[in-house]
Amino acid sequence: MDLAKLSRISMKHLITLHVMLDTLSVTASAERLCLSPSSVSKTLSQLRDSLNDELFYRNGNSLVATPLAKRLGPSVQQMINDMNQIMSQDAFTPTNYEGRFTLAMRESTFELLAAKLSAHILGLAPHIHLDIYSKDNIGFDGLINGSLDFVLLPHDLSQPNPSQDDLVWETLFSDEMICLMNSSHPLAKQSHISFDDYLSFSHIGITDTDLSTPYFDILLAQQSQKRAVPISVPDFGSAALMCHHSELLFTCSRRWASIASQAKGLTVKSLPIEYGKVAYSLVWHKQSMKDPALRWLYEQILLCSR
C-alpha cells in the first residue's frame, strides 16, 4: 500500500469526481459544490496527476468520462456514503437537511406518485433539493455509478430483473393491465373483446431498453401468435394520445389509466387473456441503505405508495 500516494487524494477530490460523473460539466459541478469553475478544474487536475488518467475528455460540446472514471464511480459513491455515515453518526434530521436526492421514474409513475411524493418530502424536509429524471434519460446505470438514488417503474413481474447483483427490487403495489381504445373504435361498443379481436388490430408498444420482453408476448410467441406493433413510444401518455386519433390499441396499467389526463375519454376493456402479474417497483443500490438520509427517503416513498 502506497500511503504517500494515497495521502495526496482527499475527500475533496472524491466528491468532485462524484459530482462530475453526475453532471459531466465543470460549471454545473461548481454550482452544486458552491465553488468556482477554476477551483473544480484545479481539483480535477490534481486528481488526474494522482491517477495518471484524463478522467474526462471533450467530445464535441460534451464531456465524456473515461473508462477508469466510470469504473471508479460506484467505489467513490460508497466511500462518500461511508464518510457521511461517520460524520453524521447515523443521525438524520429532515427539517435541517440541505442535501440532494435523485430519482428516476417512468412517465406513468410521475402520474401516480411524483406530485404526492414531492409535496410530502418537501413538507418534512423543506431545505432539500429533489431531482426527478425521466427513466428514458437515466436508468439502472445511474444506480450503479452513483448518480441516482432510486428508480421507480412499472414492470411485468414475470420479466427477469436486469442481472446487476448490486441492485435491490421491492414491489410498492400491484396492478393489472387493461386495453385502451378510441371511443369510436369498432371494438368499443362490445361488452367484451375476444382474443381474436385483440390480435386483429394493431397495437402501440412501450420501449424500455433495461427490461426484457414481457412475459405476455413470450406466451403469445409460444402459441405462434403475436401482436402487430407498428409504433413504439417511450411513455404511456404518448401512447394514449395516439389512441385518441387512431384505431390502435394500447395495453397499459389500470391505475394509470384511471387518473391520467391523456387517458380521459378512451374506452377501457378487460384483456381477453391472462397478461401475468404486474407491479410498480422501487429499485436501489444495496449500499444506499447505509446512508441515513437515503433510508429516510426510502421510508417516505413506501409511505406515499401505500
Image: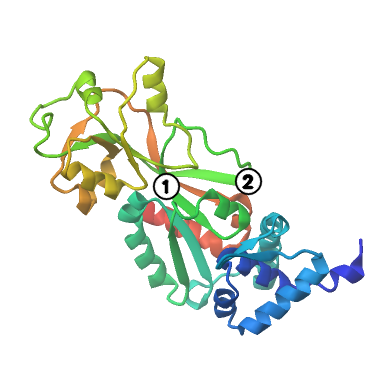
- Sort mark 2 into few (<14), some (14-19) or many (20+) by Cα contacts within 10 Å: few
Left or right position of 235 against 272? right
* Res 138 visible: yes
Give the position of the N terminus as an image quadrant: bottom right
* Res 90 visible: no
Left or right position of 150 against 64? left
Left or right position of 44 against 24? right
Which residue is farthest front? 60
Q: In the image, residue 17 lies at what x, y percent?
A: 67, 68
- Sort mark 1 into few (<14), some (14-19) or many (20+) by Cα contacts within 10 Å: some
Please, what is the three-letter code of the amino acid marked with disc 1?
Leu
Q: In the image, residue 134 lies at what x, y percent?
A: 42, 56
Q: In the image, residue 80 lies at what x, y percent?
A: 68, 66
Q: Residue 58 shows which numbered tag?
A: none
Please, what is the three-letter code of the amino acid marked with disc 2?
Asp
Residue on which the image places disc 2? 166
Q: Are marks 2 and 1 in contact (CB under 8 Å)?
A: no
**Residue 61 figure quarter:** bottom right
Q: Residue 153 shows which numbered tag?
A: 1
What residue is shown at x 62% (from left), y 56% (from top)?
145
Q: In terms of secondary structure, where does tag 1 sit?
A: strand
Q: In the image, residue 165 lies at what x, y percent?
A: 63, 41
Residue in front for this viewpoint, 72 or 44: 44
